[in-house]
Structure formats: C-alpha cells, structure tokens
C-alpha cells in the first residue's frame, strides 16, 4: 500500500510539498523491510498452529498491513480532487502547433517586397521542427529595383510572373535539412501548379493552407489534380485566433 502512495507522489512531483504533511503519518505507519519480514515469519508460524519464531510466541491471527486499503483510496481521491492555485496552472490562450507554424508563414510573408501579394511558407518535419522557410520574391542576385513588380502589362516580360519565385519554392530550396521528404508545408495561399510539382518531387507529404481565393484559376485546379494523383492531402486550416499581434514591448 505504501508503494502505491509513493507512486502517486512520483507521478506528480510538483505536489510533493503540498502532500508531504498529509501523507507523512500514513507512510510512517507502513511496515519497513525488517518489520515486513518479521510479520511474514509470524504469519507462517501462526498458520502452523502457533509456535515460536526466534524465541517469540506467536498468536495465530491474520496479519494486518500498516496502511489500510481505505486510507490509500482516500489519498487517491484527494489527489484527483486537489485544486492547484491559479498561479501554478499553464495558460490556455497559447498557440496550437498548426497556428504557430501558419503564423510563421504569415510572418515570413512580411519579408516579401511584392506590393500586391505577400506569401510565406513554412516546412515542418515529423518532430514538429521547422526545416524550411520562404517568401515570394525575385531570385538571388537579381536586384529588386531592376525587375517589374506589376502584373497588368500587355507585355509578359514586363510582368512579375516571369521572374518571381514563389514562397513554396524558396522554402524547399532554402531548407536547412538534407531532405524535406515526409514533411508538412504550411502556406498562406493554396499552391499553384508549379509549386505543386516541387512539393510532390520534394516528397512533402501534406499541405496545410489558409486561403483558397484562387480556387477558380486553372493553375489552382491543375495543382489540386496533381496533388490528388500523387496522394498528397491538402487541408484548409481554420485557426482559433483570427488575429495575432506581435508586441515587442511585451518583453520589457
């Protein structure tokens, strides 16, 4: 019985200071190793009709444990009903994993210099570790002020689409691991068909996205067709928090 009490304390070490005054008398009443051995010998002698063990007269009666079942059950019930002070409880308004990773993709999007659309992507492995981050922008070494950011020119060469690298591509290419196979990618917008190709080829196993506002475009339709055929599931995530504020002064 005493072992059960000690196991209860072991399961919740933070409660030891609170429970020690209550449990000390109960634990002290539990028989020690020597006493347990003596009681076993007495019990064996009693079963043999009441003889002497080491010169002690033994009375035939049932040996009782130092800690009763009812006492242990009472302590277990007390543990279940024990109320912890508010200051010792974890807060509940924290970010869930999916909200956290999606928020990272949104934060990464703020690095984009695209005046029209800022998109970010975050790649996470099975251990919930970030292995790749990216946002939409021009290729490395291409000056941002020497290529067009517009998208309405009749001349395709004067539109950004011919030059911009999407967030998904940059996240995959900028990975900090040897591979992103088996990972999950979190993106603000549903990937286009070109990004879907890279996602599939990189071995990414799942796509979590926030917005599907371009669902009617041929590029998005083709993207979903590719992902479906490759067996890569995609899920639209609806966060509990619609707005996350980063306040640098909160650390002061």
Image (cartoon, rainbow, N blue to C red):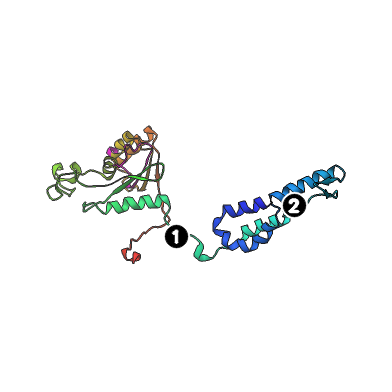
Q: Position of residue 64 (x, y in %)?
A: 77, 52
Residue beneath the point at 57% across and 59% down? 15
Residue toward you, 10 or 45: 45
Locate residue 78 relative to residue 91 in the image: left or right. right
Q: Position of residue 12 (x, y in %)?
A: 56, 55
Kindly tell me whether residue 218 is visible in this rendering.
no
Locate residue 230 relative to residue 16 in the image: left or right. left
Quadrant for the C terminus, please: bottom left
The image quadrant of residue 216 is: top left
Residue beneath the point at 18% across and 48% down? 152
Please give the residue where the numbered disc 2 appears in the rendered image.
65
- Tag 2 secondary structure: loop
Q: Which region shows up in magenta? A: 175-194
Kindly tell me whether residue 27 is visible in this rendering.
yes
Residue toward you, 145 or 61: 61
- Tag 1 secondary structure: loop
Is the magenta region chiefly helix, strand or loop? loop
The image quadrant of residue 215 is: top left
């Amino acid at each position: 019985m005493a072992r059960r009490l000690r196991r209860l304390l072991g399961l919740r070490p933070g409660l030891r200071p609170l429970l020690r005054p209550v449990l000390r008398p109960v634990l002290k009443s539990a028989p020690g190793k020597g006493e347990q051995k003596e009681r076993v010998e007495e019990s064996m002698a009693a079963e043999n009709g009441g003889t002497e063990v080491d010169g002690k007269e033994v009375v035939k009666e049932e040996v009782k444990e130092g800690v009763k079942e009812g006492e242990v059950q009472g302590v277990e019930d007390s543990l279940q009903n024990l109320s912890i002070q508010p200051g010792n409880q974890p807060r509940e308004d924290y970010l869930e994993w999916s909200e956290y990773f999606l928020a990272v993709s949104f934060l990464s999007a703020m690095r984009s210099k695209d005046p029209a659309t800022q998109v970010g992507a975050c790649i996470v492995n099975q251990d919930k570790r970030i292995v790749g981050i990216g946002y939409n922008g021009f290729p490395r070494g291409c000056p941002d002020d020497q290529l067009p950011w517009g998208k309405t020119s009749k001349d395709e060469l004067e539109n950004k689409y011919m030059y911009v690298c999407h967030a998904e591509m940059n996240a995959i290419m900028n990975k900090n691991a040897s591979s992103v196979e088996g990972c999950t990618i979190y993106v603000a917008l549903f990937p286009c068909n070109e990004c879907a190709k890279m996602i599939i080829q990189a071995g990414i196993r799942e796509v979590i996205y926030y917005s599907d506002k371009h669902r009617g475009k041929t590029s998005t339709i083709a993207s979903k067709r590719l992902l479906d055929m490759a067996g890569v599931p995609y899920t639209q995530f609806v966060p509990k928090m619609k707005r996350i504020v980063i306040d640098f002064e909160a650390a002061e």
